């Protein structure tokens, strides 16, 4: 009989944890980060990157020959830092600590040092590397960007609840203005090791676990992870991680005002010839309305709106990992979104599968069979 102890079944999952399963949080983490600060990428063409960024809804903070800083309308840090380099790749994430004393505590616990960030960012950082080899920065006391004028959201009539009369609805076909960075999704060959590292060092907690059908006894293969700010609700996931045959960036997500902004902004992107990967729909884990796009270098980025917010009282949900379980409504997940479209990306993943099976990691033949079942579910 399935246990429902600690579940939140009516919110986003039908199952709670079984006895002795992963608790989804560390008992005594080193620190508890407040949020993502920014993501760092390398791109060969900053002009093309900025052109897409403006169409997607970012605002430029600054651009030099070697670096591009992009922001949303919310106050705080830039959302994205792009450095010029020979090929497009994800470098890592910066998380925001509560204050600089947390940086000292983290540095002492990890045998690293607190360093000054460049003057245009301000503040301090502790630079770490997660078990997958991805750079993780934890920052504090950075310069705070002022709030920009937000994009207007639509006034909606809900059935007989009339909030708009003698006025027409005409959302303009313009970029959906990004408000803030929401989350990043990563794939790793060392999923449980990496998960535990983030929980223990940064104090993150799991909102949802996913497992391969028929392999639950082997443990989870994906987790949606949020910040622990006590009784202050935070995004359902700030970081999501999944087991796979390679260590790679999957996508990053940026909040916009509402569905109309997202849809009209999508039409604007399509008019400019950019490629929609999947959308528009509504997710199950996190409940976000989503729309996925490819940037000029093929990296996947998401507009989202109306996501779930949880405080620290909710325990993780558990559910099987399926493609059909990615959305409550919307078009079927595309081959492009799933990385199954024939081409360089799919070929790289096939090569990674063969290599991973020969290496000492968590992605073994049984896990490969589980993943193949997921792609056909």
Image: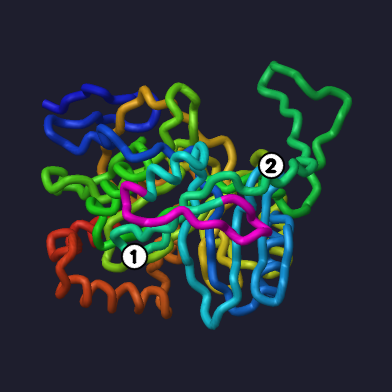
Give the answer, above or below, for where 188 lies relative to 18: below
| Residue for point 67% across, 40% down | 257
| Image quadrant where residue 26 sits | top left
| Residue for point 21% across, 31% down | 17
Q: In this view, does 280 lie to the left or right of 269?
A: left
Q: Can you identify the residue that label 1 sits on?
A: 133
| Few, some or many residues within 10 Å of mark 1 (<14, 14–19, 20+) | some
Of residues 197 and 43, which is closer to you in this image? 197
Residue 4 in percent (x, y) is at 22, 23
| Residue for point 88% across, 25% down | 166
- Highlighted range, magenta: 108-123
Q: How far apart are marks 2 and 1 (CA)?
A: 31 Å
Q: Of marks 2 and 1, which one's residue comes earlier in the chain?
A: 2
Of residues 42 and 10, which is closer to you in this image? 42
Give the answer, above or below, for where 254 lies relative to 52: above
- SS under mark 1: loop
Of residues 245 and 12, which is closer to you in this image? 245
Q: In this view, does 91 lie to the left or right of 194?
A: right
Residue 211 in percent (x, y) is at 23, 46
Residue 233 in percent (x, y) is at 49, 27
The chief SS type of the magenta part is loop
Q: Can you identify the residue that label 2 sits on?
A: 75
Question: Would residue 376 be visible to someone looking at this image?
Answer: no
- SS under mark 2: loop
Of residues 85 and 236, which is closer to you in this image? 85
Q: Magenta stretch containing residue 112, yes or no? A: yes
Q: Magenta stretch containing residue 94, yes or no? A: no
Question: Would residue 312 be visible to someone looking at this image?
Answer: yes
| Residue for point 57% across, 60% down | 293
Coloration of the structure image = rainbow
Quadrant of the frame with the N terminus: top left
Q: Please identify the residue farthest to the bottom as the structure is shown.
A: 86
């Amino acid at each position: 009989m399935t246990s429902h102890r600690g579940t939140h079944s009516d919110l986003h999952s039908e199952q709670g944890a079984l006895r002795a399963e992963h608790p989804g949080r560390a008992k005594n983490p080193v620190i508890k980060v407040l949020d993502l600060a920014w993501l760092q990428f390398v791109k060969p063409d900053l002009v093309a990157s900025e052109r897409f960024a403006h169409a997607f809804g970012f605002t430029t903070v600054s651009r030099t020959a070697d670096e591009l800083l992009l922001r949303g309308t919310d106050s705080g840090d830039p959302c994205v830092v792009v450095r010029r380099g020979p090929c497009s790749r994800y470098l890592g994430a910066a998380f925001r600590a509560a204050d600089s004393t947390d940086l000292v505590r983290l540095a002492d616990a990890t045998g690293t040092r607190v360093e000054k960030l460049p003057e245009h960012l301000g503040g301090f950082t502790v630079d770490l590397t997660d078990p997958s080899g991805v750079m993780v920065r934890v920052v504090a006391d950075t310069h705070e960007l002022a709030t920009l004028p937000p994009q207007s959201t639509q006034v909606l009539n809900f059935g007989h609840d009339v909030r708009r009369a003698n006025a027409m609805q005409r959302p303009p076909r313009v970029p959906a203005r990004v408000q803030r960075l929401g989350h990043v999704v990563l794939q790793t060959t060392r999923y449980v090791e990496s998960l535990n590292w983030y929980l223990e060092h940064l104090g993150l907690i799991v909102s949802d676990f996913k497992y391969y059908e028929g392999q639950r006894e082997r443990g989870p293969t994906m987790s949606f992870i949020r910040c622990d700010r006590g009784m202050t609700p935070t995004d359902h996931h700030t970081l999501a991680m999944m087991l796979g045959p390679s260590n790679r960036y999957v996508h990053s997500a940026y909040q916009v005002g509402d569905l109309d902004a997202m849809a009209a902004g999508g039409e604007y992107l399509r008019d400019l010839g950019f490629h929609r990967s999947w959308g528009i729909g509504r997710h199950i884990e996190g409940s976000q309305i989503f729309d996925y796009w490819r940037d000029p270098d093929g990296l996947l980025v998401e507009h989202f709106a109306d996501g779930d917010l949880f405080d620290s009282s909710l325990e993780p949900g558990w559910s099987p990992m399926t493609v059909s379980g990615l959305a409550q409504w919307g078009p079927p997940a595309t081959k492009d979104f799933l990385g199954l479209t024939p081409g360089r990306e799919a070929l790289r993943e096939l090569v990674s599968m063969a290599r991973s099976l020969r290496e000492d990691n968590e992605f073994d033949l049984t896990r490969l069979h589980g993943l193949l079942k997921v792609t056909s579910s």
